Image (cartoon, rainbow, N blue to C red):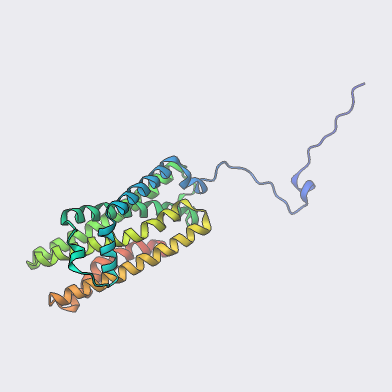
Amino acid sequence: MPLPTLDHTITAEQAFGSSSTLAIDNGIDVVSSLHSGALFQIAVLAIGLIYTFFIVRYWDFLRYFIISALGVHQSSSDKAHINPGEQTNIEVVMIILGVVTLSLCSLRVVELWGADIVAGISTQVAVWVVVLVALVGLSLIFAYQLGTIYLSALICERSDVGHALIEIKSLYLAVGFVTVIPFGILFLLSPTTPAIIGLCCGILCGLIAVIIFVKETFLFFVSQKISILHWILYLCALEIFPVSLILAPILR
């Protein structure tokens, strides 16, 4: 005579109480895996290696301009070893590294605080969309700033002023990225708490670099005997306006 079978199927309410509900697994959380891909990690590693190489190779140059940016006077002999061509190359490399780092940081920001933005999108598509949007956006801002300076200098027939402004902006943008990139890498690769600390430190360094840049542009306009009103218009049109375009959709 066969033994009777017992029905062991019970509901979640019967096992854990009437307040319990069954959680349905819909698969891997896209947001939590945005920055864990191999391509992302290779990109961060490449940034770290290139940054380390330039820091070690051109430390004297970078040290000179960082100290000068802080307002410390240095002798002319300290600047004698700096080649203008090398300076331009270093500035270009640091700006490119900084822009790529900020683009990757936008991906981590979305992961931590903007999960709704990529809801329902596959991981690979979300990574490319977020990074490319940030990269294109930052590139367009820099192109707008440089193009506006060149156009204004051409119309006003003051190419010397336009060229000098671009040199000042490139120099202090590169110096700012030198201080921000290490904290950006920390933000990209660390768990949540250290990442937030790295983000706050990077923002602080960026704000200091912006304050120094604003001071230098003010002194430049004064030295060229250009009206302070034009300096204010320059800041509003080329510095504050692009930043407001970035912050407006974020703060909504």
117 above or below 25? below
Indicate the position of residue 42 as horizontal and vertical percent values. 40, 42
- Residue at position x 32%, y 55% in the image: 98
The N terminus is located in which quarter?
top right
Q: Residue 142, can we see it?
A: yes
Is 131 situated above or below 238? above
Residue 54, position as x, y percentages in the image: 29, 51
Task: Report the side of 249 relative to 138 (left or right).
Answer: right
Residue 191, image x, y percentages: 52, 53
Q: Nearer the viewer, residue 2 or 142?
A: 142
Toward the viewer: 191 or 29? Answer: 191
Q: Is residue 125 above or below residue 224?
A: above
Question: Which sits in the foreground, 226 or 197?
Answer: 197
- Which residue is farthest left? 157
Task: Tell me if residue 7 comes above or below residue 15 in the rendering.
Answer: above
- The residue most toward the top is 1
Task: Tell me if residue 252 can be seen.
Answer: no
Query: Image check: 87 left or right of 19?
Result: left
Q: Residue at x 23, y 62 (%)?
A: 171
Q: Residue at x 76, y 43 (%)?
A: 11
Q: Position of residue 236 (x, y in %)?
A: 25, 71
Residue sitting at the far right = 1
